[in-house]
Image: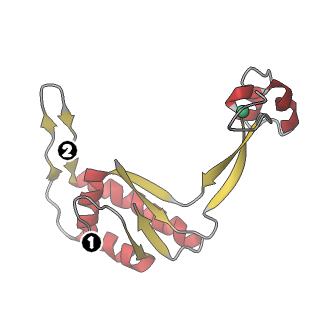
């Protein structure tokens, strides 16, 4: 499982056309995948008339998430939220705050002296548990800051994570 931090921008989602896989035998399929063609109707004769995804048109409408976002593994998100000074518990890694609170959290996390190793690496016989270092945290804070900065430019008021 993982946790994604989102900047809640007004222009959160868009729809986009993609060639449906049922029309992949069309000689034009690749050109649509590459965005080189927009005459979508040429895919219809190659599409499966009973396709559940495109209804036989050969064209799928897909929702695209435009919100600035960054994703972390659950265990890493726990470490990050703790460093940010934001509430968190073991199981329920979701929440929301305004941009100013997140910015303060990032400053706090950078100013608190973190141990070199925040989670030990585990090496078992058939398993390696990745460790988490101060450097990993610094990198995560930069990525999170990018989400806040680009969210702010696009009018976001809040950051959510879930
Ligand atoms: Zn289809």
* Residue name at image x 39 percent, y 60 percent: 162
Q: Are marks 1 and 2 in contact (CB under 8 Å)?
A: no
In the rendered image, which quarter is residue 42 located in? top right
**82 lies left or right of 144:** left
- Dot 2 falls on a residue whose secondary structure is loop
The span from disc 1 to disc 2 (Cα, nearest Å) is 23 Å
| Residue on which disc 2 sits | 131
Residue 136 seen: no
- In this view of the protein, which residue sits in the foreground, 18 or 58? 58
**124 lies left or right of 139:** left
| Residue on which disc 1 sits | 87
> Which scheme is used to colour this image of the protein?
secondary structure
* Residue name at image x 44 percent, y 76 percent: 99
- In this view of the protein, which residue sits in the foreground, 103 or 58? 58
- In this view of the protein, which residue sits in the foreground, 73 or 60? 60
* Residue name at image x 71 percent, y 32 percent: 51
Residue 79 seen: yes
């Amino acid at each position: 499982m993982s946790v994604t931090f989102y900047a809640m921008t007004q222009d959160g989602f868009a729809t986009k056309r993609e060639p449906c896989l049922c029309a992949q035998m069309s000689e034009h399929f690749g050109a649509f995948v590459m965005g080189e063609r927009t005459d979508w109707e040429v895919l219809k004769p190659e599409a499966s008339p009973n396709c559940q995804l495109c209804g036989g048109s050969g064209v799928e409408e897909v929702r695209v998430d435009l919100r600035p976002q960054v994703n972390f593994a659950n265990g890493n998100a726990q470490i990050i939220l703790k460093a940010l000074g934001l509430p968190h518990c073991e199981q329920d890694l979701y929440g929301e705050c305004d941009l100013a609170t997140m910015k303060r959290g990032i400053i706090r996390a950078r100013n608190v002296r973190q141990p070199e190793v925040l989670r030990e690496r585990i090496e078992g016989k058939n398993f390696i548990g990745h460790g988490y270092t101060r450097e990993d945290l610094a990198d995560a804070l930069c990525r999170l800051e990018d989400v806040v900065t680009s969210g702010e430019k696009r009018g976001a008021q809040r950051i959510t994570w879930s």
